[in-house]
Amino acid sequence: MNTSIDIIVPCYNEEPGLNYFYTETRKVLDTIENYRFRFLFINDGSQDQTLRELRRLAALHSDVWYLSFSRNFGKEAAMYAGLKHTDSDLVIIMDADLQHPPSMIPSMLKGIEEGYDCAAARRTSRAGESKIRSFFSSMFYRLSNRMTDVQMAQGAVDFRVMTRQMVNAILQLSEVERFSKGIFSWVGFRTKWYPYENVERVIGTTKWSFWGLFRYAISGITSFSIAPLRMVAVTGFIISLAAFLYIIFTLIKTLMFGIDVPGYVTILCAVLFLGGIIELSIGILGEYISHIYLEAKDRPVYIIQESHLEQNSSDSVPDTHHKE
Ligand code: UDP
Ligand code: MG
């Protein structure tokens, strides 16, 4: 038995560390028997010389393949492109910065051999990460797990081994705005979790800004849950009810005791409060409309400018550089 495994590696400005990533990972793979490994790097429109480095690696090693995007489409798009361009029996997704320890691959493969459909890594510590970021991250997991049907594991990272069956299921979700953490969980299947200590990035820098993560979190929640929409409706109902009661109270008071003119503070509070709630509600609606807008345009998730793939593993995307 020789199971084929493709390792999908999204790369954005990873030139300095790619060679090291390849040799370190290859070292681990060489100790594993009965599997045939290939690397499929996705150059996500890097501004540095990542593409040149990939061309060099591909010329040197017969197990290195790559796709290169015409611009930066984001890691989600890169992972999707990778999944679309492989037909291997198992698929591994991992980062190019060695923050996902290759040494975990052998035990993760054991999980698949045990009959799991997916073996996924989960960070148990957030060493080396700022306090604020960890705080918001844990808030996000709590919020989204409460509001959505899909349960996302705290600290889950995009380091996974998946069976062909699960990959095919993921590819059936063809949405343009992809939120993989949710998608992985939404498709179901049995996942075995592998906890590990956070590894700090050795070479290069993180591509995530705080606001980038914040937007990602909002779009993650709103693409898997309509709970915020319900909240708008419920808030509207509660406020209407309260207003109704207050109107009756005021009417009775006026009928019995006449009008007392001062009421400036009450009016001001009501106006500001309602104004805030209305703005917030419109914002939440807007979030969903933006999802509809982006999905309705149905633009491609990524555009490939150059690819170096084995012939049989490419789909109908026009490729410029083919090599057998
Ligand atoms: N990445 C990508 N496109 C992007 C941003 C990141 O392909 O727009 C890749 C990056 O090269 C790395 C992985 O996604 O392999 C994780 O990125 P990073 O290390 O910056 O994120 P972090 O580990 O801080 O979450
Ligand atoms: Mg990283």
Image: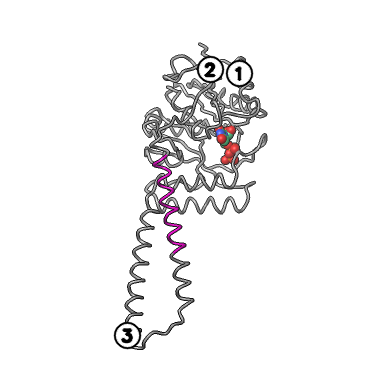
Kind of residue indicated by mark 2: His
Q: Which residue is mark 3?
A: 255
- Report the side of 199 relative to 248 (left or right): right
Q: Position of residue 9 (x, y in %)?
A: 54, 29
Q: Which residues are magenta?
A: 275-293
Image mark for residue 299: none
The quarter of the displayed image where residue 206 is located: top right
> Mark 1 or mark 3, which is nearer to you?
3
Label 1 and label 3: CA atoms lie apart by: 85 Å
Going 49% across and 51% down the picture, which residue do you hit? 140
Lower sequence index among marks 1 and 2: 1
Q: Which residue is mark 1?
A: 55
Residue 53 visible within the image = yes
Quadrant containing the N terminus is: top left
Q: Which residue is mark 2?
A: 308
Residue 254 vs 210, above or below: the answer is below
Going 33% across and 72% down the picture, which residue do you hit? 244
- Report the side of 205 relative to 42 (left or right): right
The magenta stretch spans residue 49: no
- Report the side of 231 relative to 309 (left or right): left
Q: Secondary structure at mark 3?
A: helix
Q: Secondary structure at mark 1?
A: helix
**Dot 3, how many residues are within 10 Å of its Cα: few (below 14), some (14-19), or many (20+)?**
few
Kind of residue indicated by mark 3: Leu
